[in-house]
Amino acid sequence: MHSLVAIDLNFVCLIVLLRIREKIVHFFETDTRRPGVPDRDRMVKEFSRSAADRRQPKPWEIRTPATLLETVHYLLTIVLPDSRRPFYQRYEFIFDRMRAIRQEMVIQNLSAGEVLPILEPIVRFLCYSAYRLCEAPIAEFDPKICAQHLQECLKKVLRCYDELDHASSSADESNRFEMERLYLSFNIGCLEATQSAITRYGASEPKLRLHITTQLECNRGNYFGAMQNILQFAPLEAAVASLQFPRFRRQMLLQFSVAYQSRVQTVPLEWLERILHYEGRERTCLPDDCRHYNLQLVPKGNEQRAGDGSRNWAVKFEKAQFDSQRCAHRSEHENTVHTNASNAPNTDHRFMIGDEAAFRGCFLRLGSFGELIVSSDLGVSILLVSTPSGSAGCSSSRSTSLISSSVL
């Protein structure tokens, strides 16, 4: 059932007219020059949940693999960079339309060679969105749903590559190790992901060695070593892995509460910043995190001096005082990087990806891991461009060109 009949244009027109009549046209399906006016050329098939009372779609109602591929390309190159709406609204629209694409892939039972070009850009989009929206309120972004779909897509991609291996196919596998690295980065610290990679490629595979080493460091409880390795990841892989930093920091603070327990001695806050990698604008978050876990902050000298930041503060660790019941994320949102919203309501404390210049497709790393600079909303630059195989990190001397539509 690989090649269904081309979709019936009369049926498409009927669905479009029905949606216009029922006023269920999304903002991104309206005319860019005439707000509120539906544009039939911009309308994309929405997701419809399968149910017992729903009939199976007819062959002419389903898009062909080539059309699905073209739809993914349209969503990521036209809708995603559209800055007329905030990113979370773009994410909601694209996420829904991509669910419909994946649903039709399953209905048609496409081959691995047809699935991979469609699913790989979806994986990159979900990875970036999980990072980009990690601090958004739950009303705008549900991290659990995003993580669930990202996990499903990553596993499906890896299964497709396994199918190609069994079929001895000569299909393009240039992005295989990029997907493996994203899978390991997203599942950092997961024993199953580690065993899966080692079983398939061995622990000494050069293109995965850094990520497998990071996994092993997490399993040993060496979170500092794992964070040091993450600094060398490619940008998108580092962004996904950084979602686990709050959990790593919590574990390290718990370890410090045992190792540095003292009623008299203290640990400089400035030293903790370096060890826990509170870089750049995130430095203001460390005192809040210490209070979150019930750690006592004390001034180094006899007097507290305002405006000295972390230089004149220290932490007194006591195992009995550490609040081990506290989670490593904000109560209303999972996997977030803590932010001091009261002092800087418009400041983003994610590892910075936000240069508002045009899409240059150029990945830059400036200084420490705290400043990851790429093009505005990434769009084409990360979502459609794969990291060159064998590259473990990213430097200012390396750039990646925007991918052309012909690649998809």
Image (cartoon, rainbow, N blue to C red):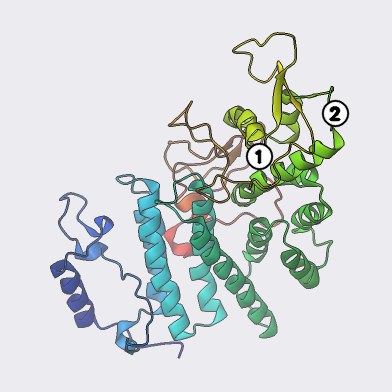
Residue 117 location (% of width, % of height): 51, 69
Q: CA distance from mark 1 to mark 2?
A: 42 Å
Mark nearest the camera among 1 and 2 is 2
Q: Could you tell me which residue is drawn at 64 percent across and 28 percent down?
A: 287
Q: Are marks 1 and 2 in contact (CB under 8 Å)?
A: no
Q: Is residue 334 left or right of residue 290?
A: left
Point 47% across, 28% down: residue: 344
Residue occupying image coordinates x 49% and y 85%: 109
Residue 369, percent from left and from top = 65, 37
Of callouts 1 and 2, which one flags the residue occurring earlier in the amino acid sequence?
2
Q: Which residue is mark 2?
A: 262
Residue 296 visible, this angle: yes
Q: Amino acid at mark 1?
A: Ser
Q: Residue furthest bottom?
A: 1
Occupied quadrant, residue 127: bottom right
User: Which image quarter holds the N terminus?
Assistant: bottom left
Q: Residue 142: give x, y in percent of width and height.
A: 46, 56
Q: Which residue is mark 1?
A: 395
Q: Is residue 121 above or below residue 377?
A: below
Q: Give SS at disc 1.
A: loop
Tag 2: amino acid: Ser
Q: Secondary structure at mark 2?
A: loop
69 relative to 168 in the view: left or right: left
Dot 2, how many residues are within 10 Å of its Cα: few (below 14), some (14-19), or many (20+)?
some
In depth, the one of 275 and 63 nearer the eye is 275
